[in-house]
């Protein structure tokens, strides 16, 4: 990963750029996206903190359009990979081919579509685990290894993956190790009537205005650094750790319902992502520090893909969302 150095006299200007840019981002995205304010906020939090995002929703809810529009706002190189059962790891990372150079034959590495700033892994759960695993090194180390040689990915680098929750036939659930690398699991639901009517009118009449790029990749790297410098009180960080620790059955902090309804809780990365996301949210909102409300606002997208329910919970019709909501009520 590439790190960037920011001089102390630059900090104030960058913070102002972030806070002023938030409203401009929403204005540009409104050219193509109607409603979905919470979804957009969570996606922006992921991007500003340098993390990856899993987007879950039914077909036709503009998941692909949203990701493409965000990439245009940030003037980033965008690639879409359609995940299918016959997709191979080399189709993602790249492969070596035999080429003739200066009269000699040699193996040359041809980069795959993963070599871009924003990767849309469309319907990621439609490809077997072997191919899914091709993204693991890229997501964690921002590099690809081919034939024993490492190739760095362009910075910034984000994986925004989509999955369809309703078609189980022909899908392969993502392994827990890969799920844990996504900062958020963002749920996109159907629009309210008025918003859906607006979409229908807009998309069946004139073409929407083009999205204007607002930031460069270099700007994004500076934003990542500023998010990490955002102050957070030890008490607030402790609240995040306490919430995550309470999801683990058998721990002293776990409420009784956790021991009954959860068979496997969230790991350390959940607490890290919760604090990092809260810092980005506070910075985007123009706050001077992170609050408990920032932690609570992100607890659902951080935990919903990191908690495994027990058979008892499934038999009683208890959902992961129910467990998280009750956890927030009981843990202070």
Image (cartoon, grey):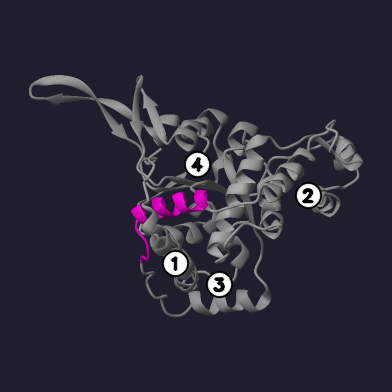
Would you say 23 lies left or right of 188 here? left
Residue at position x 36%, y 65% from top?
A: 213
Question: Residue at (78%, 49%) from the top-left corner?
Answer: 324
Per the model, the C-alpha gap separating discs 1 and 3 is 26 Å
Q: CB atoms at circles 3 and 2 under 8 Å apart?
A: no
Q: Are marks 3 and 4 in contact (CB under 8 Å)?
A: no
- Viewed as shown, does residue 278 lie left or right of 262? left
217 in the magenta segment? yes
Give me the C-alpha separation between circle 3 and circle 2. Answer: 28 Å
Q: Which comes before the other along the chain, label 3 or label 4? A: 3
Q: Which is more N-terminal, label 1 or label 2?
A: 1
Q: Which residue is mark 1?
A: 16
Residue displayed at 65% across by 41% down: 270
Image coordinates for residue 233, horizontal then vertical, percent: 65, 51
- Mark 3 or 2: in front is 2
- The mark found on residue 34 in the picture is 3
Task: Quote the CA–CA distance across marks 1 and 4.
Answer: 39 Å
Residue 288, image x, y percentages: 57, 62
Distance of mark 2 from mark 4, alpha carbons?
30 Å
Reply yes or no: does residue 71 show up in magenta.
no
Residue named by callout 4: 83
Provide the residue span drawn in magenta.
213-229
Q: Quadrant of residue 96?
A: top left
Q: At which x and y percent is residue 28? A: 44, 71
Q: Is residue 232 visible?
A: yes
């Amino acid at each position: 990963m590439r790190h960037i150095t920011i001089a102390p006299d630059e900090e104030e200007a960058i913070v102002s750029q972030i806070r002023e840019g938030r409203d401009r981002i929403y204005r540009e995205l409104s050219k193509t996206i109607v409603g979905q304010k919470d979804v957009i906020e969570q996606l922006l939090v992921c991007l500003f903190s340098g993390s990856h995002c899993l987007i879950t929703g039914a077909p036709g809810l503009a998941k692909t359009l949203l990701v493409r529009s965000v990439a245009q706002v940030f003037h980033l190189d965008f690639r879409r990979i359609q995940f299918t059962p016959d997709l191979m790891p080399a189709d993602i990372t790249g492969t070596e081919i035999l080429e003739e150079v200066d009269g000699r034959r040699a193996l040359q590495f041809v980069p795959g579509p993963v070599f871009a700033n924003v990767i849309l892994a469309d319907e990621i759960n439609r490809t077997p685990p072997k191919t899914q695993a091709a993204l693991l090194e890229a997501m964690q180390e921002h590099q690809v290894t081919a034939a024993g040689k490492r190739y760095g990915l362009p910075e910034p680098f984000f994986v925004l993956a989509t999955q369809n929750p309703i078609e189980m036939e022909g899908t392969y659930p993502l392994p827990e190790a890969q799920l844990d690398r996504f900062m958020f699991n963002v749920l996109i639901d159907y629009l309210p009537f008025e918003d859906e009517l607006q979409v229908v009118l807009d998309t069946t009449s004139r073409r929407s205005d083009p999205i204007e790029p607002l930031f460069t990749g270099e700007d994004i790297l500076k934003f990542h650094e500023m998010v990490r410098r955002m102050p957070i009180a030890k008490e607030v960080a402790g609240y995040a750790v306490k919430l995550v620790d309470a999801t683990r059955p058998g721990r002293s902090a776990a409420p009784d319902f956790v021991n009954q309804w959860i068979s496997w809780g969230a790991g350390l990365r959940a607490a890290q992502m919760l604090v990092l996301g809260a810092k980005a949210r506070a910075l985007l909102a123009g706050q001077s520090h992170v609050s408990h409300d920032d932690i609570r606002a992100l607890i659902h997208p951080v935990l919903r893909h990191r908690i495994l329910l027990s058979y008892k919970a499934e038999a009683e019709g208890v959902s992961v969302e129910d467990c998280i909501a009750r956890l927030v009520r009981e843990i202070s």
